[in-house]
Image (tube, helix red, strand yellow):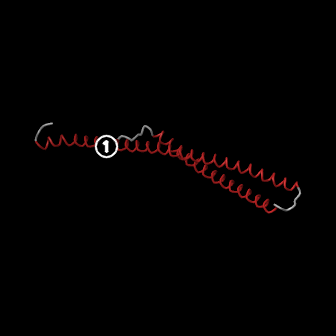
């Protein structure tokens, strides 16, 4: 029997490797999103804590420099919160893109795997057909001899 060779085997191997890389990229994107989510939550907690501190001090006499310092810290915290929100949006987009890429590569790999299975089945069918033709060819002279006929 002739050896089975799938013409697109190297393409299939390459696509499978790319699919595994896409899986890793998706996992990395998920981890980055989790980190960005955690950082955003921390920034929100900082803003809430600063707000509570300022609310407690309302109505109490405090030096101007102290109020100015609180205001500056709250402005910095607000800026850090905005940056964390932007980072979260970027990480969400990256994850969506990684999921899309993995799905695309998965579809390509599946299509190539189906083509390979079909080629394998066709190869097996052709090999079985050739084997049967060979058996028939070997049996034909014997049948003629048994019937009393010539070659």
- Residue ID at (49%, 45%): 106
Quadrant of the rendered structure where residue 60 is? bottom right
Say whether residue 59 is left or right of residue 96: right
Furthest residue in direction front, as rendered = 59
- Residue ID at (47%, 44%): 107
Q: Badge 1, how many Cα within 10 Å: few under 14, some, many 20+?
A: few
Say whether residue 86 is left or right of residue 69: left
Element marked by disc 1:
helix
Quadrant of the rendered structure where residue 58 is? bottom right
Q: Is residue 76 above or below residue 130?
A: below
Furthest residue in direction left, as rendered = 148
Residue 147: x and y, percent? 11, 43
* Front position in the image: 110 or 79: 79
- Residue ID at (76%, 58%): 51
* Front position in the image: 135 or 18: 18
Image mark count: 1
- Residue ID at (66%, 53%): 35
Q: Quadrant of the C terminus?
A: top left
Q: Quadrant of the N terminus?
A: top left
Say whether residue 16 is left or right of residue 53: left
Quadrant of the rendered structure where residue 43 is? bottom right
List the residue tagged with mark 1.
125
Residue 133: x and y, percent? 25, 40
Say whether residue 141 is left or right of residue 9: left
Residue 66: x and y, percent? 86, 56
């Amino acid at each position: 029997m002739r050896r089975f060779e799938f013409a697109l085997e190297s393409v299939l191997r390459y696509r499978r490797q790319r699919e595994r890389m896409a899986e890793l990229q998706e996992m990395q994107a998920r981890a980055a999103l989790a980190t960005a989510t955690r950082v955003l939550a921390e920034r929100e907690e900082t803003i809430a804590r600063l707000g509570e501190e300022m609310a407690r001090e309302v109505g109490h006499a405090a030096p101007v420099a102290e109020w100015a310092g609180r205001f500056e810290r709250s402005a910095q915290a607000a800026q850090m919160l905005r940056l964390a929100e932007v980072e979260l949006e970027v990480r969400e987009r990256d994850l969506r893109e990684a999921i899309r890429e993995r799905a695309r590569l998965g579809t390509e790999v599946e299509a190539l795997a189906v083509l390979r299975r079909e080629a394998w089945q066709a190869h097996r069918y052709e090999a079985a057909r050739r084997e049967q033709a060979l058996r028939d060819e070997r049996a034909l002279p014997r049948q003629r001899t048994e019937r009393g006929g010539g070659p």
